[in-house]
Each structure stands twice: as structure tokens, then as C-alpha cells.
Amino acid sequence: MIRSMTGFGEASAQLAGVHFFVEIRSLNSKYFKAVIRLPEEFQSLEAEIESSLRKRVTRGSVFLSGKCTDVTGDAAYEINTNALARYIEQLKGAPQIAGGELRLDLAALLTLPGVLQPPANEEQRLEQARKGFLPLVDHAVARLTLMRESEGGALLADLLANRADIQSRLATITERAPSVSADYEKRLRARIEQMLTENGLTIQPVDLVREVGIAAERGDISEEIMRLGRHVEQFTDLLSRDEQRPVGRTLDFLAQEMLREANTIGSKCNDSAISRQIVEIKGAIDRIKEQVQNVE
């Protein structure tokens, strides 16, 4: 099944008064790469979430953002009254303040190191975050996959259209190639015989046949036509598979090989009609190469 590497998915849920939200975006990439952003206190879950992503996504740059909003009293930080009292005591003893009026900014005091302490039940909050985030990751990935499959359908239609164009033009080349090769041998034989006559030279028939055969072999494109046809067949087979194995890289490699064979045919054949077909084939291959960059 063809899937695109671009997609989007999100999911949210409420758990014990805490609202969890997960958003996933994916873009083209040669390999799998995950960028995960969670609240600082839950960053220890990132490795677990990345492992879950790897099981469902094989290629692409995946950006996951997880947020949570705790509206319960358990989210409140503890005020370390001992640390706060110690700060105030030190401020009262400062030379600039001693004997004068002391005005304290409570908001500024709360930002001092050690005054606010995270809730004591960190393990419990982490476990709650695990139960909140991990199922949402699965739901978001499922929606991401649906979107990637939908876009993959459009990619598949375009790839099949270009594949059909290549097959049609290759069939025309295959039909014309034998007559082009035969005409080339006749012209080559006539030219050699003319050169021998003009220069008063003679050559044994067997030698003439050998030289004509060697020259004609250099312009023979039958092997390249066969290889290009096989590449197109393999390309078609990969597009028609129902398995979940990613095929993007293989399709990209096949497109490069098809372009290689098309270039060789174009350079070896001196027939203008075949050259026109090759130009169109190369255009279709370039469109394929562009599209498969987005196939997982």
C-alpha cells in the first residue's frame, strides 16, 4: 500500500481532572526522525513515546507535541516556608535595610531558588501522564496514518499514470527498434563499400561482415529496452502490493535505474523518432522521481 510521508493527527482526553492533548505532524525525510516536545516534568516519557512511534511510522520527520492542563489542586507547587523565612531574614539584615522600613515583593520572593517546590507526588503524576499521553499517541498516529494513506492514493494514481505513459512509449520503441537497426546496418555497409571503392581498396566479405557487425552492435538498444521494461514491471509490482512494508526507497532506486537505461537508449540510437519517445519517457521518469520522494 502506497502511503505519503506527510500527514497530521491529533487526539485529546480528560483523565482525573487533567486534560491531555497530543498533536503529530509528519514531513518528508529519507529516514525516520522524531522530534518530541512534552512538558518539562514529563520529558522522561519521550523515549517511550518515540519507541511507540517507530512501530507505526517507518519514514519521515515526525513532530509530536504533547500538552496537559491540570485544573485540580494537586498541580499546586508547595511553598517552602523555611526557605522563604530564611530569605526574609537575610533581607532584614542587609546593611541598606537595617533600621529602615522593609518592603517585600511576594511575587519576586516566590521566584527565588528553593521557595517553590514541585508537588511531592511526582511519581504519581508521571504515571498519570503516561496513562494520559500514550493512548493519545496511538489515536493520533492512527489519524496520521489515515491521512497519509489518503494522500498515498493520490500519489498512486499519478505514479500509475506516468508508468502507463512509459510503457506505451517503450512499446513504440520496441516495435521500431528492429527496423532502425536493420536500416543502420544497410547504411553502414553501403558507406564502407563506397569508401573502399573510392580509395581503390578491397576487403574480404567476412571482414566486412565482422566490421559492420561490430559497429552495429554499438548502436543496438535491444538489451537496454529489455532492462527498462523489467524495471517498469518491478515498479508496477511494488505499486500493486497490499503489504505494509514501505517501498519509497525502492521506488526511488528503480526510477534512477529507469532513467539510466533511457539515457543509454537515447545516446546509442540515432533515430529521431525513438529520440522523441525517449525525451517523453525521461520527462515521465523525472515526474516519478519527484513523486516518490514523498512515498513512505
Image (tube, grey):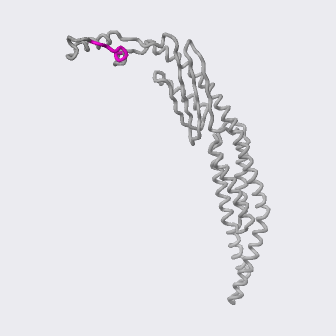
Q: What x and y, as percent, mark residue 255?
A: 65, 51
Q: Is residue 209 left or right of residue 85?
A: right
On the rendered image, what quadrant is the C terminus found in?
top right
Any magenta on residue 107?
yes
Is residue 272 located in the magenta-colored stretch of the structure?
no
Residue 67 lies, with reference to residue 175, above or below; the image says above
Query: In which quadrant of the rendered image does the N terminus lie?
Result: top right
In the displayed structure, would residue 263 be above or below residue 59? below
Where does the magenta region start and end?
Answer: 102-109
How many callouts does the rendering have?
0
Q: Nearer the viewer, residue 238 or 168?
A: 168
Which of the pair 210/184 is nearer the observer? 184
In the figure, residue 199 lies in which quadrant?
bottom right
Q: Residue pushed farthest front?
A: 101
Q: What residue is at 76 percent from the left and 57 percent from the top?
A: 169
Q: Is residue 74 left or right of residue 217?
A: left
Left or right? Give the position of 91 relative to 277.
left
In the image, residue 146 lies at what x, y percent? 68, 31
Residue at 39% over, 15% down: 117
Q: Is residue 164 above or below residue 14?
A: below
**Residue 126 x %, y %:** 49, 18
Q: Position of residue 154 (x, y in %)?
A: 71, 41
Q: Which of 7 and 178 lies nearest the eye of the viewer?
A: 7
Locate residue 88: give its quadrant. Answer: top left
Say which quarter of the image contains residue 4. top right
Camera-side residue of 9 and 91:
91
Relative placement, left or right, of 171 versus 85 is right
Give me the residue at 67% from left, 66% from top. 268
Give the residue furthest to the bottom.
200
